[in-house]
Image: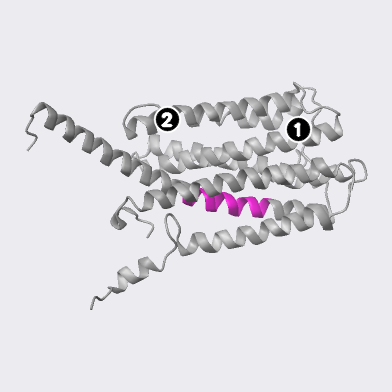
Amino acid sequence: MRDAGFIFGSYLITLGAIGAFAWRTIRVGRRLADEVAEEDKPWR
Amino acid sequence: MTTISPQRAEISSLPRGTGTRATRIIGIATIVMIAWLALFGLVLSPADRDQGDSVRIMYVHVPSVWLAYLAFIVTAVCSAIHLFGKRHSLGVDRIAGASAEIGVVFMAVTLATGMLWGRITWGVYWQWDARLTTTALLFVSYIGYLAVRGLDGTQQQRARRSAVIGLLVVLEIPLVHWSVRLWRSLHQEATVLGTDLDVSLDGLMLFSLFVGVIAFTLLFLWLVLHRSRTLTMIDLVGDRELDRAVIARRAEGGIDHA
C-alpha cells in the first residue's frame, strides 16, 4: 500500500481522538454518578 | 438479614454512571461497525484509479464531516427549542452543548484527516483554499460557542446566550458546503450526492463509506446520550456546591436564613 503511514495515521487519529473523548466522558460520568443521588438520574 | 427491593436490584444491574441497557447495545453495535469500517476501508475496498490508496482516508474523512454537520444541526435545533419553546428546557440545552462538543471533536478529526489526504494529493498539508478556510472558521466558531457556554452566570443565562450563538453559527454550514462551488477551490466537489443527486461511487467503495456513516452515526448517538447525562450531573453538583457556599457565607455573616 502506497502512503501507508498517512493512511494508517488518519485512522489512528480518528479512532484515537474519538476514543479519548469517549473515555473522558465515561470517566467523568462515573465519577459524578457517585456524587449524585439515584433519584436525580432520570435515565435510570 | 437485609433484603433488596426489586427496584433497587434493577438499578444495581444497570451499567455504572451514565450508562443504560440502550447505551450498552448502541456501544456494542458501534464497536462492531467501527471494526467493519477498518476492515472494509483498509483491506477490502479497492484503490481508486486516480487517487490510489489515499482514497481510503475518505472513509473516515467524509463520515467525520457529515457527523460534525449533523452534530451542529442538532445543536441548532435544540437551541431553537430552548429559545422559542414555552418551557425553556435546560435538558435540551444540555443536549445542544453535548452535541456541539462532539461536533468539535468530529470537525478536528475532519481537519486532521483532510490535511493528511492533502499532503498525499496536493503535496502540502494546508492551503488557504476556500473549503479549508471556511471549515477552519466553522471549527473555531464552535470552539467559541463552547467558550460562551463556560462563562459565568446562571444555567438559564448560559442556555439563552449559547442558544443565540448556536442558531447563528450553524449558518456557516451551507457556506462551507457550497464553498467549492462559490469560489475556485482545490478541494474536489461532493463525490456522493452532488447537486445533480448522482452517486458517482459504486461497489465496495460506496459500501465502505456507508459503513463509516452508520458507525459514526451510532457513535454520535452513544456519545450524545452519555455526554448530555454527564452535563446534567455537572449542573446538579454545581447547584449543590453553590447552595453550600451560600449557606457557609450566611453562617459567617451570622444571617439567619430560616
- What chain does badge 1 belong to? B
* x and y, in percent, of residue B7 in the image: 31, 70
Tell me the residue that label 2 is attached to.
B150
Q: Secondary structure at mark 2?
A: loop
Q: Earlier in the sequence, mark 2 or mark 1?
A: 1
| Left-right relation of B177 to A7 | left
Q: Is residue B90 above or below residue B205?
A: above
| Residue B55 place in picture, x, y as percent | 83, 44
Q: Residue furthest right?
A: B49
Mark 2 belongs to which subunit? Answer: B
Same chain for the residues at labels 2 and 1, yes or no? yes
Q: Quadrant of the N terminus of chain B?
A: bottom left
Q: Quadrant of residue B5?
A: bottom left
Residue receiving disc 1 = B115
SS for dot 1: helix
The kind of residue on which mark 1 rests is Met
The answer to whether residue B87 is seen in the rendering is no
Q: Who's the residue at 35% across and 55% down the image?
A: A42
Residue segment shown in magenta: B213-226
Q: Is residue B240 left or right of residue B250?
A: right
Asked if the magenta segment contains residue B76, the reply would be no
